[in-house]
């Protein structure tokens, strides 16, 4: 993806829905368009970004900022501690693993079993952020069409359809650039100490995103990021946080929490919800 294509995709993703069970990819933004009002009444303008990209028709409610290079080495943490740390980087609360966390540490099964089999996790990363684009969050509000699609009762087919169409969260920020990250997963059967794990971390190969990675050295890879940036992080707000007071919000919140906790395939979500809490136990608001 060229710098221009990447910039247009990043700006276009801000305000769209996102299914947090998947990894961070611009192409995973929901195609239903922006779900929030972004001060379109003030008119659109051109937005110039580092790398020479210029995006036209950008709402006033989307702003950009120049990024920086950072290096971050985590402590050796438990499964729950690392899940919480990754969530915080995405502006999320709690310890339920996100799709980004699963992709980072190559988890693909039930998170309860993954947690039980894991002794520790850590990572060491260089993050080259060229720029960020984000929504002004002071007065974020959902568009009326989204509120009108919210089922007012515990209705598994309608709830599954809503989540598939709009996702679980709204993208409110995108950071573009490249990242060079080394991740370590220590299983319960391992007898390595924390210092042993950290020593192994330094010896592992790099996992890069953004730029062109053709097996070249770190310096050569860095020079390609400006021309071929990729998403290195996103920030989100839960859709349900923007539905406070809307009838049916509690039912959607319950359905989303179940979906994120157990991560059934989206095509099986309706059937999954039908076998959950009986309707008269479900929240009423």
Image (spheres, rainbow, N blue to C red):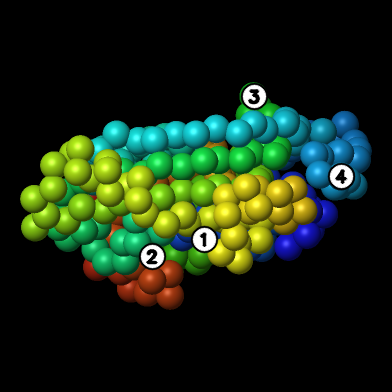
Q: Give the CA separation, mark 3 to mark 1.
A: 25 Å
Q: Which label is found at residue 156?
A: 2
Q: Give the CA separation, mark 3 to mark 4.
A: 29 Å
Dot 4 corresponds to which residue?
52
The kind of secondary structure element at disc 2 is: helix
Q: Give the CA separation, mark 2 to mark 1.
A: 10 Å
Disc nearest the viewer among 3 and 2 = 3
Q: Give the CA separation, mark 3 to mark 2.
A: 33 Å
* Relative to 115, residue 70 above or below: above
Q: Give the CA separation, mark 4 to mark 2.
A: 47 Å
The kind of secondary structure element at disc 3 is: loop
Dot 3 corresponds to which residue?
138
- Mark 4 / mark 2, whichever is N-terminal: 4
Dot 1 corresponds to which residue?
162
- Mark 3 / mark 4, whichever is N-terminal: 4
Q: Residue furthest top?
A: 138
Q: Give the CA separation, mark 1 to mark 4.
A: 38 Å
* 189 sits to left or right of 54: left
84 or 262: nearer the eye? 84
Disc nearest the viewer among 3 and 4 = 4
């Amino acid at each position: 993806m060229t710098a221009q294509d990447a910039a247009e995709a990043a700006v276009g993703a801000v305000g769209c829905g996102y299914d947090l069970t998947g990894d961070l990819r611009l192409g995973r933004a929901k195609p239903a368009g922006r779900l929030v009002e972004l001060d379109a009444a003030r008119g659109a303008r051109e937005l110039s970004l580092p790398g020479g990209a210029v995006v036209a028709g950008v709402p006033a409610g989307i702003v950009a900022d120049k990024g920086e290079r950072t290096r971050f080495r985590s402590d050796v943490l438990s499964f729950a501690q690392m899940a919480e740390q990754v969530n915080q980087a995405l502006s999320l609360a709690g310890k339920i693993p996100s799709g980004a966390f699963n992709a980072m540490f190559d988890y693909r099964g039930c998170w309860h079993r993954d947690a039980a089999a894991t002794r520790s996790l850590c990572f060491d990363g260089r993050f080259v952020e060229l720029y960020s684009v984000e929504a002004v969050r002071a007065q974020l509000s959902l568009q009326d069409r989204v509120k009108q699609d919210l089922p007012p009762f515990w209705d598994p087919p309608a709830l599954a359809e809503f989540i598939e169409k709009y996702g679980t969260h709204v993208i409110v920020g995108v950071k573009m650039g490249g990242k060079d990250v080394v991740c370590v997963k220590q299983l319960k059967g391992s007898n390595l100490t924390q210092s042993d794990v950290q020593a192994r971390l330094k010896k592992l190969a790099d996992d890069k995103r953004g730029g062109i990675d053709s097996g070249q050295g770190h310096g050569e890879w860095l020079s390609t990021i400006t021309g071929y940036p990729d998403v290195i992080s996103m920030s989100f707000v839960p859709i349900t946080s923007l539905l406070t007071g809307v009838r049916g919000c509690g039912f959607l919140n319950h359905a989303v929490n179940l979906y994120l906790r157990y991560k059934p395939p989206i095509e099986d979500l309706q059937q999954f919800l039908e076998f959950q809490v009986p309707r008269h136990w479900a929240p009423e608001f």
